[in-house]
Image (cartoon, helix red, strand yellow):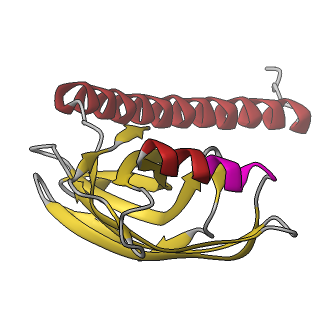
Amino acid sequence: MSLAHVKSPKHCANKQEVKVQKRYKKLFLGVSAILSTISLLILLLWLILRPSKPEFRVKQADVYQLNLIDDLHLLNSSIQLTLSSKNPNHRLGIYYDNLQVYAVYKGQQITLPTSLPPFYQGYQEANLLTAFLAGSRVPVAPSFGYEVGRDQSAGRFVLNLKAMGRLRWKVGSWVSGGYRFNVNCVAVMPFGPTLPTPPLTLNQPTRCSTTL
């Protein structure tokens, strides 16, 4: 007479659980390998292409209004600005998002940020960007009028024109995540008691610095 070995339901359940765990482990390892390979390829592509920062220049800047309400230390300002933007890369396109420009004088923002529409820039492509910057009753430091007078005595008006936004690199059909960038342009304009105003005008284009 032979003995029959009957497995308990608990034993069968444990064995099934082990099989499921092994299946999930293999799936996890497979997905991890694929993601690691993709990340490595992106890194290699990035190292090979070595993207260069976009280049900006101030082509034209005209200060039409810079009126100070002395008692209240409030400023009304208006500036017409033309920037050139160039993509120096040979194999990378650039998407520009959330681009804003504004003016700063002696560390004080004197206009509200003006938004520019998003755009795409192909390889070695250049674009002209125009914006009208304005500020109405913008609070400024009590020394603002004194600083403008010093610039007038020196015969030149020094203005910082700034831009900020996000960009995305494009290689073929692949588009990167967003990277924040900042642009700073120093515009030096002739300014003196014998010069007709307005506007104060930039005489020659000036190159800007870009941080990414």
Looking at the image, is 163 positioned above or below residue 89?
A: below
Whole-percent x and y of residue 30? Answer: 45, 33
As drawn, is 134 to the left or to the right of 195?
A: right
Residue 211 drawn at (x, y percent):
43, 37
Q: Is residue 103 left or right of residue 120?
A: right
Report the front residue among 44 and 70: 70
Q: Quadrant of residue 113?
A: bottom right
In the rendered image, the quadrant that contains the C terminus is: top left
Residue 42, above or below 142 = above
Q: Which residue is nearer to you in this view: 168 or 164? A: 164
Give coordinates of residue 187: x percent, y percent: 37, 50
Would residue 178 be seen by someone viewing this image from the given angle? no
Please name the residue shown 72% across and 29% down the image.
Answer: 18
Q: Is residue 18 magenta?
A: no
Residue extending furthest toward the top: 2
Q: Residue at x 39, y 32 (%)?
A: 39
Tell me the magenta residue range.
142-147
Rendered residue at 46%/42% (across/down): 154
Q: Please, what is the dominant secondary structure of the magenta stretch?
A: helix
* Residue 100 locus on image (x, y percent): 50, 65
Q: Nearer the viewer, residue 203 or 209?
A: 203
